[in-house]
Image (tube, grey):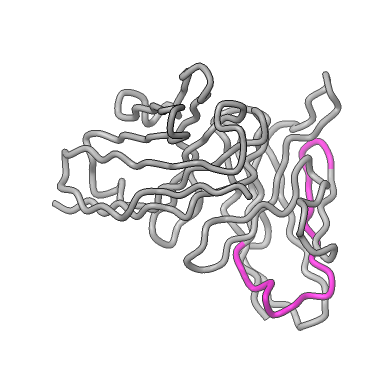
Amino acid sequence: DIVMTQSPDSLAVSLGERATINCKSSQTLLYRSNYKTYLGWFQQKPGQPPKLLIYWASTRESGVPDRFSGSGSGTDFTLTISNLQAEDVAVYYCQQYFTTPWTFGQGTRVEI
Amino acid sequence: QVQLVQSGAEVKKSGASVRVSCKASGYSFVGNYMHWVRQAPGQGLEWMAWINPNTGGSDSAQKFKGRVTLTRDTSISTAYLELSGLRSDDTAVYYCVKSWGNSYGDYWGQGTLVTVSS
């Protein structure tokens, strides 16, 4: 199985500042036949299901504010939340869908 | 709009089975795989299985093989997860997750809490 490792486990960021979450996979998530990277980012607030933010490593889902951005390639990825808002307090997960079993990072808790 | 509406919470005894349903609307049910993911209380996300609603083909994570059964009823756009031999560590919220085609998961059901008691 592909192991996904996030860092840090938690971070506190001031309102309006930037939050950076890292994710590393145990093998490449780049599928060479189509040059797509099979990595997504999710946001989960208490009592709610996860919500898709980013797919293909850097494509923002429709309706997601542009302060959320994804970057990276191969095995190293980053989710950046610019201009952090109060409503961004949540746990964030990276997830690979390169192969099943889908695997998720352990989550990063973002607080103000 | 896409909606995945799951069945209500369940309380089961150890050794019993549970079936969770996921009714889809707002998209082509047979055109997109459905996955199941669970989350134990206060824990992370664990992928369980997928089903191709078009063919009925499915597969599950190794740890669930022999205990998980995935079915679907295309006439009512509903997918089902059945988990047998319940143990206390199966206590979790179970989510159905629509995938875009056969790739990333883009919509999640509201979750179904399954509590297993001894």
With B38 as the anchor, is A7 left or right in this view?
right
State the image quarter where residue A11 is shown: bottom right
Q: Is residue B44 magenta?
A: no
With B72 as the anchor, is B15 left or right in this view?
left
Which residue appears at 64% of the width and 59% of the height?
A43
State the image quarter where residue B67 is shown: top left
| x and y percentages locating residue A86 in the rendered image | 69, 80
Q: Is residue A81 magenta?
A: yes
Total numbered badges shown on the rendered structure:
0
Closer-to-camera residue (A44/A79): A44
Which residue appears at 45% of the width and 57% of the height?
B43
Q: Please, is residue A16 above or below residue B11 in the view?
A: below
State the image quarter where residue A108 is shown: bottom right
Q: Please, is residue B9 above or below residue B98 in the view?
A: below
Which residue appears at 22% of the width and 37% of the height?
B17
The residue range painted magenta reads: A73-91
| x and y percentages locating residue B58 in the rendered image | 47, 22
With B65 as the anchor, is A80 left or right in this view?
right
